[in-house]
Image (tube, rainbow, N blue to C red):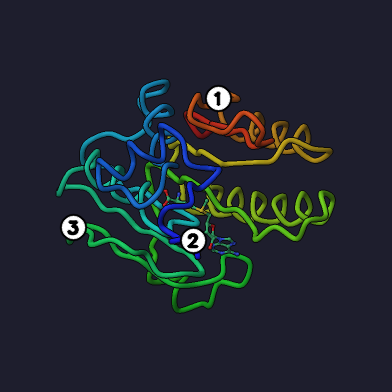
Amino acid sequence: MHNPRSIKNPWEDHYTQKARKDHFPARSVFKLQEIQQKVNLIQSGNSVLDLGCSPGSWLMLAATLTGPAGNVVGIDLKPVTVTLPSHVRVFIADMLALPDEISEAIGREFHVVISDMAPSTTGSKSVDATRSFELCQAALTTAQNRLLPGGAFVCKIFQGEDSEAFIRQIKSMFNKHRIFKPQSSRKASREIYIIGLNKR
Ligand SMILES: C[S@@+](CC[C@H](N)C(=O)[O-])C[C@H]1O[C@@H](n2cnc3c(N)ncnc32)[C@H](O)[C@@H]1O
């Protein structure tokens, strides 16, 4: 019988190991770190809204960058798996059907909205791309309604038929935009991050 712990996860890489060593629950933290280095996204004292925040790596990094004077809010279908400082609040909810009371409690006037939301994959490329696009649209509507003028938006999108139209929407809402594939994003993944800066 194999000891399951001795079977190496084929997805495990340098970033997975580094995340574990640095006590982050997911390697995705390095993608946000790269975005931070590229565009200086989150400042001390900022209000940050993190959509699709579980298991909590982006929340941990965002909370460190804002410091205790900031305000970080996370939303996900699933709970986070880490202990977070008191300036972070997490809501368990579906961004495609946000209940009114949670929508109210989250608040408005964020400096930064970040979305790393991804649907559970079905195996069908077109179904997965459609679901991912729905999540991107929900994130963009949230940014439209809750970002302060001058605010910034980051959204994961899977490159496909709809991504060009999404980029056009970002261009019309923000003064500057970037399209970014972090080094830490797996080469085989079609994911890219669209960054909108300086909301009109
Ligand atoms: C790649 S993970 C996010 C990882 C996170 N950025 C981190 O660093 O820990 C994607 C998340 O999107 C969430 N998600 C997918 N659909 C969602 C929805 N409709 N509403 C809220 N969250 C959703 C999933 O539950 C999952 O936890």
Q: Who's the residue at 56% across and 70% down the image?
A: 94
What is the spatial separation of the Cα atoms under label 2 and label 1, in whole angstroms?
A: 55 Å
Left or right of 186, for residue 53: left
Q: Who's the residue at 47% across and 45% down the image?
A: 114
Image-quadrant location for residue 32: top left
Q: Does 31 sit above or below residue 4?
A: above
Residue 118 coordinates in the image, percent (x, y)? 60, 53
> Which element is circle 1 on?
strand
Left or right of 168, for residue 192: left
Mark 1 sits near ligand 1, with its Cβ under 8 Å away: no
Left or right of 94, for residue 45: left
Q: Of circles 3 and 2, which is in front?
A: 2
Q: Does 80 sit above or below residue 34?
A: below
Residue that badge 1 annotates: 175
Q: Earlier in the sequence, mark 3 or mark 2?
A: 2
Amino acid found under the numbered disc labelled 2 = His
Q: Earlier in the sequence, mark 2 or mark 1?
A: 2
Residue that badge 3 annotates: 85
Amino acid found under the numbered disc labelled 1 = Asn
What is the spatial separation of the Cα atoms under label 1 and label 3, in whole angstroms?
A: 33 Å
